[in-house]
Image (spheres, rainbow, N blue to C red):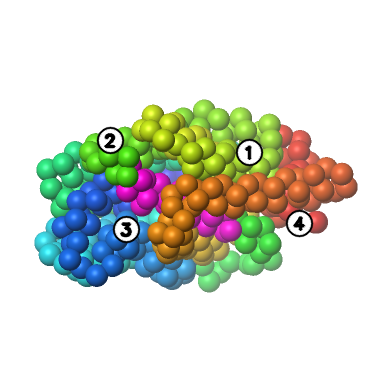
Amino acid sequence: MKHTTSGIPSQSRITLLCLAALTIMSGATVAPSLPALQQYFSGTPNSDLWSRLVVTLPALSIALCAPLAGWIADRHGRLQLLKAALVLYGLSGLLALFQDSLAGILTSRLLLGVAVAGTMTSVTALVGDYFSREQRLTYLSQQSTFISIGGVVFLTLGGLLASLHWRAPFAIYLLALLLVPAVKIFLWEPMRVRPFKHRDPKKEKQDNPLAFYALLAAATLNSLAFTLIPTQIPFYLREIEISSPSLIAMAIASSNVMGAIASLLIYRRARNRLGVLGVFVASFTIMAASFGLLAGAENLTEIVAFIALYGLGMGTLIPHIFSTALESAPESKRGKTAGFLTTGIFLGQFISPFISQPWIDKMGYSSAFSSMALILMFAASSAALIYIIKIKKNSHWHILPGWDRETDPTGKVFLLSAR
C-alpha cells in the first residue's frame, strides 16, 4: 500500500469514514430508547433530567479529555491513541448492557466519552495529515455525508432494537471493536508526526487565535442547538401522542438525511460561491428558520420537515468548520486544534439539556425552540455584519494565515483578521 498525502488508498479512506461515524453513533443509537429508559427508572429522583443525560453525558468527558487527547496525538502519534480509544469504546457499551441503575449507566457513558475524545481527535488530526487542502474539502464533504447517513442507520437500528428492549441499543457500541484490525492494516502514522522535536516553528503557519475562537463558538452553538433534537424531540412527540420508537427515530433522522445531501451536493458549491463568511451566514440563517418553524409545529409531518430543514444548514456548517480549522492549524498543532474543536462541539452537547430542560419545564417547548431560533439568528447576523464591513472597506482580511487572492481559488477573501 502506497502511503502518500496526495492520494490515500480507498481502503484507508473508507476506514477513516467508518471511524468518523462512531461520533454520531455515541448519542444517536440510544436516543429512541430514552422514553422507555425514563419510565423504567421513574422511581429515581430527577429521572427526567438524568435520562436525558444518557445521550449527552459522554459529551462532558469528551470536552474534558479532548485537549489531552490532542496533546497525546501530537507528541506520541495518532494510531496508538486511536486503537486504545476503539477498545474502550466497545467495552463501555458492553458495560452499559449489564447496569441496573441510572448511576451505573451514566458511568459507562462517561467512559464512552473518553473513548470518543480519543477517536475523534486522532481521526481529525489524521485527516489534516493525509490530505492536501482541496482534497480535504472533498473528503470532509464525504465525511459529513457519511456521518449523516450513519446517524440515520444508527437511529433506525436503535429504534428497532429499542422496540425489543430499551437496553438493546447499547450492544451496537461493540461494533467499534471490529475497526481495530482495519486501523492496524489500512492506516499509518504520518512521517511528519514522528519527528516532533525537530520541527522548526518558524517554517510553520502561525496561530490565528481570533479566527479559531470564532470557529470554536460556531461549533459549540451548533452542537447546543442540534442536541435539542435527540434529547427533546422524543418527549415533544410524546406530548402529541406519538410514542413509537421507530417514528421517533424517523423524526430525528430527518436532519441526518438532509445533512447528508447538503454535505455531499451543496457544501463545496456554497463555499466557492459564498466564501468563508457567507457559508456561516447562510447556515446559521437556515438553522434559525428551522427552530422558528418548529416552535409552531403541530403534527408529525411538520416536525419531520422542520427538523430536516435544520439538517440542511448543519450539513454545510459542519464540514465548513472542520475544513477551515484544519487549514489554519500549524502541522505540529493539528492534534491540539482537533482536541479543542472536539471540546467545543461536545461542550455544546453537554450543556444543552441543562439550558433547555429548565426552560421547557417553565415555558414549554415552543418558547425554548423560539429562543434557540433567536440565538442562531444572532450568530448569522454577527457573521453577516463582518461580511458587510469587509466588503465596504475592501480590505485584505483573512481567516486563514497566508490566504490571499493568489492562493484562494475563488478569488474571494472573506475573512476575519487583518494581515
Q: Residue at x 61, y 30 (%)?
A: 269
- The residue at the far front in this view is 363
Q: Quadrant of residue 43?
A: bottom left
- Image depth: mark 3 or mark 4 in front: 3
> In the image, which disc is placed on residue 282?
1
Query: Distance of mark 4 from mark 1, alpha carbons?
Result: 21 Å
What amino acid type should be assigned to the residue bearing mark 4?
Answer: Ser
User: Which residue position is annotated with label 4?
Assistant: 417
The earlier-in-sequence mark between 4 and 1 is 1
Query: Is there any visible trace of residue 250 in the rendered image?
Result: yes
Q: Is residue 58 left or right of residue 321?
A: left
User: Which residue position is annotated with label 3?
Assistant: 52
- Image depth: mark 4 or mark 2 in front: 2
Q: Residues within 10 Å of mark 4 (few under 14, many from 20)?
A: some
Q: Is residue 358 above or below residue 24?
A: below
Pinpoint residue 282: horizontal percent, then vertical percent.
63, 38
Q: Quadrant of residue 122?
A: bottom left
